[in-house]
Amino acid sequence: MSIHHNQPKGLFLLFFVEMWERFSYYGMRALLVLYMVKYLMFSTEKSGQIYGWYTGMVYFTPLLGGYIADRYLGQRKSIIVGGTLMALGHFAMAFPPLPFFFSALILLIMGNGFFKPNISTVVGQLYEENDPRRDAGFTIFYMGINLGAFFSPLVCGTLGEKVGWHWGFGAAGVGMVLGLVMYLWGQKALLGDKGMKPADPSDKIYVPFVLIGIVLVFLIASAFQFSGYDVKGMIPNYIYALLGVAILAALAYSYAAKTDGPSLTHVEKQRVAVIFIMVFFSIFFWSAFEQAGSSLTLFADRETNRVISLFGWSWEMPASYFQSINPLLIFIFAPFFSKMWVSLGETGKEPSSPVKFVIALGLLAIGFVVMIAAAAMYQQSGPVSVMWLIGAYFFHTLGELCLSPVGLSLVTKLAPVQFGSLMMGVWLLSSFAANFVGGFFAGNYDAMNHTLFYMIPTGTAVGAAAILLAITPKLRKWMHGTH
């Protein structure tokens, strides 16, 4: 495949490091809701809320990690800090008592904040501006993410569901350690000085301590609340949203207040506006897509016939295995999509990034139409074939390939240099909001009719696609020639 040719050597190091990090993340995610419902005996509502809180915060802390890397540590040191915290978090999950469970989630949330935005930013730094290999490079990187995500539910899911939950979580920790060791071994030789120095150094060292302190207090209070201790009443959901907006505003102000740096030009401001608008529309996509780890896993566990029989031999497939379908399909289709965009680009027919987002939302809606039919069949005649879930994941995956690598690449193309990691943090913020919405929505799974439940994400995806299509001409103008 032509996309492999002439890529920077550092890309393949980052590919394998990200592969192991995603192995650890998705291995743990595949077990999380099942572990809470079946082992900790939490209700579906509480499990959905904790799942949404955890997966949401995992995408919120990159704002903080991106900021600290840009101003204080540089990307490379931040990746090491993040990997170490995450390895500790995965191993803490291997201990049964409840305080270990919440401490583990907090370590994983903080570690991910340092790791996630900075590894993507270093990938972007491997290429010069307008390098035609960039989109293909991000697609290869994306395949690394999905290789880890494919194997982890099979390894961690089998250990967790068939041997013991804590074996599954321990395996995720081993994966993270492998990624960290590989990174420490290869970074000097393969990455040179990329990402070593902060892009925009600051002498005000107290700022990150204050921000980390605020986030830690908030996380610990949330953990106490979820574990049943009343912390001056429940933290209302809107506080989560306000916290995100407040920290985002503080970081943006901290950047803008610098008098020695050049201020943004009119073109840069419009390009940043496009990033924020695309972030908003991607929330509709991810809040529905992220049902994979919550309501779709419960559908696999309770409403799907998972017994496979051959020649008198039968085996029940663990529910967590379904989370390997999406990364497997990405691995199959990503090279095809990468080639397709290049061929369309050469003939001048490649759709613009906003149009690719519209296509993604349409495909997502089709996937949920499949789930509406599956839920209706279950109500009529009991557990349904595994093919229904596979069909839904098929359409969701095609949608993801039109949105996720395209979004990552778009941010690295549109973001002003001095805001590189911060804008990557803003892009990941869409997943923060989406996971909260998706987790709290999944918490209603037991209380709602399931055909109606799956109609809601179908409707929101179609509505968002229609609005985005209407404003696409304006967005293309504001992108000023960036395709």
Image (cartoon, grey):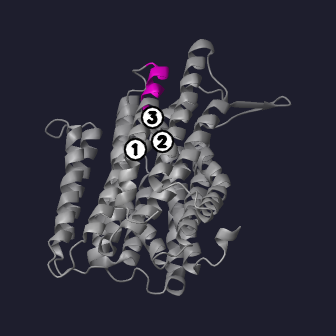
Front: mark 2 or 1: 1
Write down the region rendered in magenta.
449-457
- Residue 26: x and y, percent? 51, 51
Residue drawn 18% across and 54% down?
Answer: 246
User: Crowdedness of circle 1 by 10 Å Cα count: few (<14), some, many (20+)?
Assistant: some
Residue drawn 67% across and 27% down?
Answer: 385
The span from disc 2 to disc 1 (Cα, nearest Å) is 10 Å
Residue type at mark 1 is Leu
User: Crowdedness of circle 2 by 10 Å Cα count: few (<14), some, many (20+)?
Assistant: many
Q: Point out the tag, 2 or 1, that comes first from the N-terminus.
A: 2
User: Crowdedness of circle 3 by 10 Å Cα count: few (<14), some, many (20+)?
Assistant: some
Q: Which residue is mark 2?
A: 361
Q: Is residue 400 magenta?
A: no
Tell me if 466 is positioned left or right of 23 in this view.
left
Residue type at mark 3 is Val
The span from disc 2 to disc 3 (Cα, nearest Å) is 7 Å
Residue 285, by quadrant, is top left
Q: Point out the tag, 1 or 3, that comes first from the N-terminus.
A: 3
Give the main secondary structure, helix, strand or loop, of the magenta stretch: helix
Labelled pair 2, 3 in contact (Cβ < 8 Å) = yes
- Residue 315: x and y, percent? 73, 34
The residue nearer to you, when weighing 134 against 83, is 134
Q: Which residue is mark 3?
A: 462
Front: mark 1 or 3: 1
Labelled disc at residue 468: 1
The residue nearer to you, when weighing 336 against 20, is 336
